[in-house]
Image: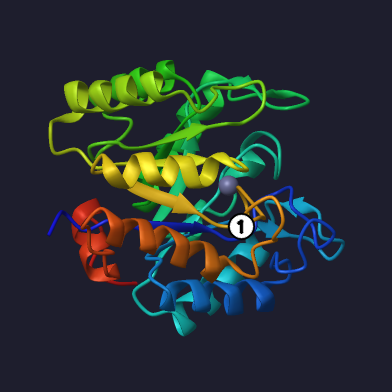
Amino acid sequence: MGNPCIICVAITGSLPTKDNNPAVPITVAEQIESTQEAFEAGASIAHCHVRDDEGRPTSDPDRFAALKEGLEKHCPGLIVQLSTGGRSGAGQARGGMLPLAPDMASLSVGSNNFPTRVYENPPDLVDWLASEMVKYGVKPEIEAFDLSHILKAHQMWTAGQITDRPYVQFVMGVKNAMPADREVFDYYIYTVKRLFGEDAPWCAAGIGPNQNVLNDWAISSGGHARTGLEDNVRLDRERLAPSNAALVKRAAELCEKYGRPVATWQQARQILGLRPAA
Ligand SMILES: [Zn+2]
């Protein structure tokens, strides 16, 4: 058997609505239920955003606290990763939940275009978010929307702004950012291994129909995989995904196809160098 594959489920995100797919969990109660099902299907990381009462993205630390508490109660061992992404807030509000000391948080280290706007990650904000993560013992997941973001993560590691070996996620298929390009993907892997070591774990996410493509590429190349309704709400052209768990099952089937066991939460924590459990 190959090395265990960590499946991360991005349950909600900032954009999808019930109109896009009624299975998108919006309230904290829905999020907990959807995550529990995904956890039972094999996900060991939940990447989380929260919404306000109108369903709009927010960085409200109280919402994050309620979600984190519910997940720790109903999914013991699950790795909770909170988003500091820029669609949910501006400036330092993006890191207002870091004092909750989740296992992990996402960290974007550079700017790029999104479908209709600039995804702004100015250097002073990146430095501040990273320093808060060090302060509260939160492991960052580096969201690489571009090759330069991997090199920036290396610089930050060298400078001590990131204390553990960086865990990089390649994000491909966001409109106006890096498309799902196989040669670039392979070069991302090459770069991660060159900078962080042959055995450095890495992960990949694809948006929309690229979700399954990136899952296939990552799982067959020894990486870890992200799925979930944040990135994609469909199983195929005709069918909406009935749940986050259904997307996790699809990724788990790819693991089976390529002879890789799905990582348990214990294995995932070990691979990522996290504390044994919350
Ligand atoms: Zn996200």
Q: Does residue 197 lie above or below 5 as drawn? A: above
Q: Tell me the residue that label 1 is attached to.
A: 235
The scheme the figure's colours follow is: rainbow
| Left/right of residue 274 with respect to residue 24 in the rendered view | left
Category of crowding for the residue at label 1, using alpha-carbon neighbours closer than 10 angstroms: few (below 14), some (14–19), many (at least 20): some
Can I make out residue 211 in this image? Answer: yes
| Left/right of residue 97 with respect to residue 1 in the rendered view | right
> On the rendered image, what quadrant is the C terminus found in?
bottom left
Instruction: Give x and y (percent) for residue 183.
Output: 37, 19
Q: Classify residue 156 by image quadrant.
A: top left
Residue at screen point 47% across, 26% down: 109
> On the rendered image, what quadrant is the N terminus found in?
bottom left
Residue at screen point 38% across, 80% down: 76
Q: Does residue 10 lie above or below 263 as drawn? A: above
Q: Nearer the viewer, residue 182 or 30?
A: 182
| Left/right of residue 72 with respect to residue 163 in the rendered view | right
Instruction: Give x and y (percent) for residue 62.
Output: 66, 65
Mark 1, secondary structure of its residue? loop
Can I make out residue 223 in this image? Answer: no
**For the residue marked with disc 1, what is the amino acid?**
Leu
Q: Nearer the viewer, residue 20 or 161?
A: 20
| Left/right of residue 239 with respect to residue 204 in the rendered view | right
The single residue placed furthest to the front in the displayed view is: 238
Instruction: Give x and y (percent) for residue 267.
Output: 21, 64
Residue at screen point 58% across, 61% down: 11
